[in-house]
Image (spheres, grey):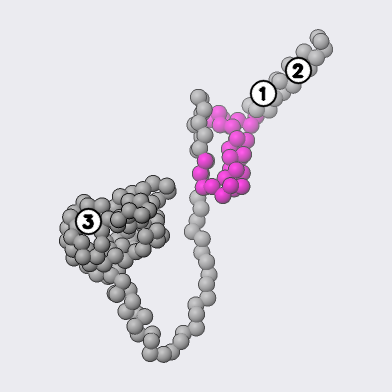
Amino acid sequence: MASKTPSATTKSASKQESKKSEMSKSGVDQELIRQLAALLTETDLSEIEIETESLRLRVARQMGPTVAHVAAPAPVAHVAAAPAMAAPAETGGTHPGAVPSPMVGTAYLAPEPGAPVFVQPGSNVTEGQTILIIEAMKTMNHIPAPRSGKLTRVLVDDGQPVEFGEPLFVIE
């Protein structure tokens, strides 16, 4: 037994020395950071954070915008091209009463499936009244009417993904 004790002590001391050499001058375990960075890559996450009693560590990577190159379709010369140009005006996007989406998410016109919608075309709405819900990152965000007036058009469908600034309603 006496011969195993010095060997075990030597192995333990060598592990501690190895651990100390992996630590930077600031006391941060560089091997741990490398492991977390590899985990970010493996799981396609953009950020990971851990916290212990003596350490709080956040590793993040910046993910640049993905650029997709798509070939433009060949122009087709015929008379129907002019009405296609007028389509954005018909959707209400340029209407002065258009209500833009304040965030990216999924739009829901009713508080829950099967329930009546918050507002319908022709409804009078008051400023601050909930007109729809946008789900973003598993959070239901109630979107209030920015002004009072008559809701003339609903420009989104229930469950439709919406982008920031996309017109949702027209309130006149």
Q: Which label sits on residue 8?
A: 2
Q: Is residue 34 magenta?
A: yes
Q: Label 2 to label 3, Cα distance in Å?
A: 71 Å
Q: Residue furthest top?
A: 2
Q: Position of residue 12 (x, y in %)?
A: 71, 20
Asked if residue 35 is positioned above or below residue 167 in the image, the reply reads: above
- Tell whether 23 sits left or right of 143: right
The secondary structure type at the circle numbered 3 is loop
In this rendering, does residue 97 appear at all?
Answer: no
State the residue position of label 3. 146
> Looking at the rendering, which quadrant does residue 91 occupy?
bottom left
Q: Position of residue 62 (x, y in %)?
A: 50, 50
Instruction: Specify few, some or many for label 3: CA neighbours under 10 Å numbering under 14, 14-19, or 20 or more.
Output: some
Instruction: State which tag comes first along the sequence, 1 or 3.
Output: 1
Asked if residue 27 is positioned above or below residue 144 in the image, the reply reads: above
Amino acid tagged 3: Pro
Amino acid tagged 1: Gln
- Tell whether 70 sits left or right of 86: right
The secondary structure type at the circle numbered 1 is helix
Q: Nearer the viewer, residue 107 or 121?
A: 121
Who's the residue at 26% across and 52% down the image?
130
Q: Tell me where the magenta segment starts and ends, as one range.
A: 21-48
Q: Label 1 to label 3, Cα distance in Å?
A: 62 Å
- Tell whether 94 sits left or right of 31: left
State the residue position of label 1. 16
